[in-house]
Image (spheres, rainbow, N blue to C red):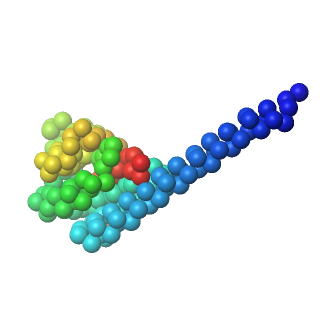
Amino acid sequence: MVSRSRLARIAVPIALAGLLTACVSQQKYDALDNEYNQLNQRLSGEIGRQQVHITRLQGAIKIAVNSQLLFPSGGWEMPPEAQATIAKMAPTLAPFVQTQIIVKGYTDNVPIGPELARQGVTTNQILSLRRAQNVEQFLISQGVNPALLTAEGLGEANPVAPNDTAAGQAQNRRVELTLAGSGT
């Protein structure tokens, strides 16, 4: 049988550790919330709410960029207007990046045509990866540390709108930036 004093010597440190863990989690939450609010205010003001959508995730911040601005249908090269938008974002993002920016490219569900196939783009996943890599390279050209960037192509996965209309397809052709490790 365990004595009360021995039980107290075991239980008190465990309880204190639990309280400290809760404090750290609250601090991370508060830091992430602060970063989210600052990014939302700065990017929405500088770029516009129609072009970027900022979402707070658990342990990260996601920035979705309107792909109608970034890419033509079936393309992965950014037009000058898109480069200007990303160029505005780069210096705003820099102070918030502590670990990594994951650039995620998406497409609609329209099959790849013969012109893209001749260029080596045989699937929507490859097209989405090229979009993500294009944004990644542009961020690097704007001074973002390449060691903090990763590009992922997710193709037509995770649509944000139905693909049965042109407007829905346009919403699904998007790029998202996830600031992983924010709030730490």
Q: Position of residue 63 (x, y in %)?
A: 34, 57
As drawn, which residue projects farthest toward the front? 5
- Between 137 and 69, which is closer to the camera in this rendering? 137
Q: State whether residue 179 is above or below residue 165.
A: above
> Residue 133: image x %, image y %?
22, 43
* Residue at x-position 39% and y-position 65%: 37
Q: Quadrant of residue 11?
A: top right
Q: Is residue 170 visible?
A: no
119 in relation to 168, above or below: above
Q: Nearer the viewer, residue 13 or 18?
A: 13
Residue at horizontal 53%, vertical 50%? 25
**Image location of residue 156, percent across then percent down:** 36, 47
Residue 19 in sight:
yes
| Quarter of the rendering containing residue 47 | bottom left
Using residue 17 as the reference point, say whether residue 167 is left or right of it.
left
Q: Find residue 81 and report its image quarter.
A: bottom left
Q: Is residue 20 left or right of residue 149?
A: right
For this orientation, the residue located farthest to the right is 1
Quadrant occupied by the N terminus: top right
Residue placed at 59% from the left, 50% from the top?
Answer: 22
Picture residue at 16% right of the left edge, 58% below the top: 87
| Residue located farthest toward the top when viewing the structure as drawn | 1
In the rendered image, residue 153, in percent from the top left (x then y), is placed at: 31, 42
Q: How many marks are shown on the rendered structure?
A: 0
In terms of depth relative to the viewer, which is nearer, 150 or 155?
A: 150
- Quick one: which residue is furthest to the left in this view? 80
